[in-house]
Amino acid sequence: MIAEVDLNDDKQVQYSEYLQMMKNFVKTGTETKFSKVITKDGKNVFRVGDDQKAYSTFSEEERSAFVRVINTVLSEDETCKKYLPIEPDSMDIFTVLKNGIILCKLVNKAQTGTIDERAINQKDNMNIFLQTENLKLALTAAKAIGCKVVGIHPDTISNGDVIVLGLLWQVLRLIVTKEINLKKIPQLIRLLQEGEEMSDLLKMNPEDLLIRWFNFHLGNAGYNGRISNFSNDVKDSQKYVILLNQLNKDLCDKSGLGETDLVKRANVVLESVKKLGVESYVSANDICSGNMKLNTLLVASIFNHCHGLDPPTEEEQYEAAKLLEDGEGSREERTFRHWMNSIGLPDVNVNNLYEDCKSGTILLKVIDKLKPNCVNWKKVSENSTNKFTKLGNCNEAVEACKKAGFVIVGIGGMSILEGNKQLILAIVWQLMRCHTLQLVGGKTEEDLVKWGNELVGADYKASSFKDPSLKNSLYFIRIMSAIEPRAINWELISQGKNKKFNVRGCL
């Protein structure tokens, strides 16, 4: 056994080798087997499975960092205290995730209120059925906030499949970057460059904003270098030293620049981070290896603790408020944005619905997925920065919608290009409705109402989805109760006029 895991042939078992040896004890044919510790791209990874040609790997460093983030963000949650802290340098994370509670809690940290926590099974020693319910709830909610869950099922997590780390990264990324937007941090206005408008910031995803912020401070420090990524551009730690010194000259000096050993220089960076009171989650080797995910965690932590940006003027605040009014953060915009991000388009990442739709290309990709052959791609300029070609894309989006049978009365390409919120919502609502009906086998809304009426009984039938009786949510609650009686706790349901309480319970 020792010979099998002793990779460096020193006749001694290192910790990672010991873990491997323990994992080689496979109790059943369905248990995940960690077959060997290998080195890939300079990182220690576990190879999963017996197939010599097809296997999955995961980084020990990433697993450990993810666990540290989980321990931090859920440390105050009373329900989670019996599962935390998780040991970062162990495989415990795969066991802890199996009952679904931690995943549900993380999703709510990423987007507050996504899951009604009363719906989470939180009993001790839950059976597999209750655990599966939690995992289904967590995966559905994760998809609803824009995570890609293709290939991940409750059984995947129950069996300890390492693919769950991919889902964890998506959720944790949302958690650590959730405050990095113009609405939460109006000081981001300081990152505007010459010729840009505030609306340009709304189009940027959190990682791009972090890169812009990083370069902003490098420029203010008089440093010539810039970064374009959180991998190779930061692995020598020089730019980290400059950034931290610019944020706090008293606590973070530039002594690290004199270090020729990259690991020692990275350790100086982490010492400075600690002096600022920032939780780094990562090690010096993680910085030196240029791991994009782990460096993103580090930079996001620094930003969230001390971004060092001057507050906006009253005029700038007014302009920002006017820009964000009825837009970014509204329920409709957020719902449709998350839906677009969740339908499995590889190149689509919507940060602000109205701004990102202006070029027309995202709408065209969504239309093409839902209604193939309706888009004439020969007329589309996918990477256009020119206003006229963008207008051409928007016009093609309108034409494609007409071919697909959507109602586009009074909507032209210019409406999309100008970011008309009401008309963009009208288009995206029809796209989302089309997708929803496709998921239920192409049925119509009338078919769904008929199906619902059969479940709720004659006394509670609805005439349509516009029926005023639906406002108290009892119709939907009865449907859910008919499908799974245990899903509804009738003691929490108001039969009177407390509509909002019922709606919250229904969701």
Image (cartoon, rainbow, N blue to C red):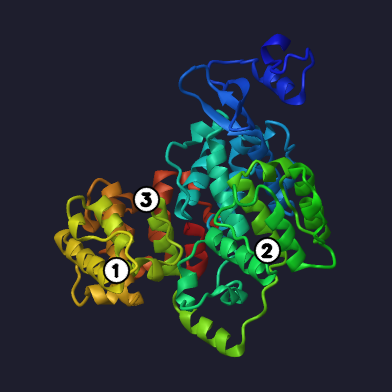
- Between circles 1 and 3, the one closer to the viewer is 3
Q: Which of marks 1 and 3 is nearer the N terminus?
A: 3
* Left or right: 375, with 333 as reference point: left
Q: What element carries label 3?
A: loop
- Please rate how many residues cluster around mark 2, counting C-alpha atoms within 10 Å: few if below 14, some from 14 to 19, many from 20: some
Question: Quarter-wise, where is residue 316 in the image?
Answer: bottom right
Task: Name which residue type carries label 1.
Answer: Lys
Q: Residue at x 53, y 43 (%)?
A: 167
Specify the label residue 343 is tagged with: 3
How many numbered tags mark residues here?
A: 3
Q: How crowded is mark 1: few (under 14 residues within 10 Å), some or many (20 or more)?
A: few
Nearer to us of marks 3 and 2 is 2
Where residue 156 appears, as percent x and y from the top left, is: 50, 32
Q: Is residue 91 visible?
A: yes
Q: Residue at x 72, y 18 (%)?
A: 8
Q: Residue 304 carries which label?
A: 2
Type of amino acid under label 3: Ile
Q: Which of 405 and 505 is in front in this view?
A: 405
* Residue at 55% over, 28% down: 159
Disc 1 is placed on an element classified as loop
Q: Which of marks 1 and 2 is in front?
A: 2
Real-space Cα distance between discs 3 and 2? 30 Å
**Between marks 1 and 2, how big is the CA–CA gap?**
44 Å
Residue 130 at x, y = what percent? Answer: 55, 38
* Residue 392 at x, y percent in the picture: 22, 68
Give the numbered dot on residue 466. Answer: 1
Q: Quadrant of residue 441?
A: top left
Q: Is the C-beta separation of discs 1 and 2 under 8 Å?
A: no
Q: Nearer the viewer, residue 189 or 136?
A: 189
Q: Measured along the vertical axis of the image, is residue 429 above or below residue 478?
A: below
**N-term mark: 1 or 2:** 2
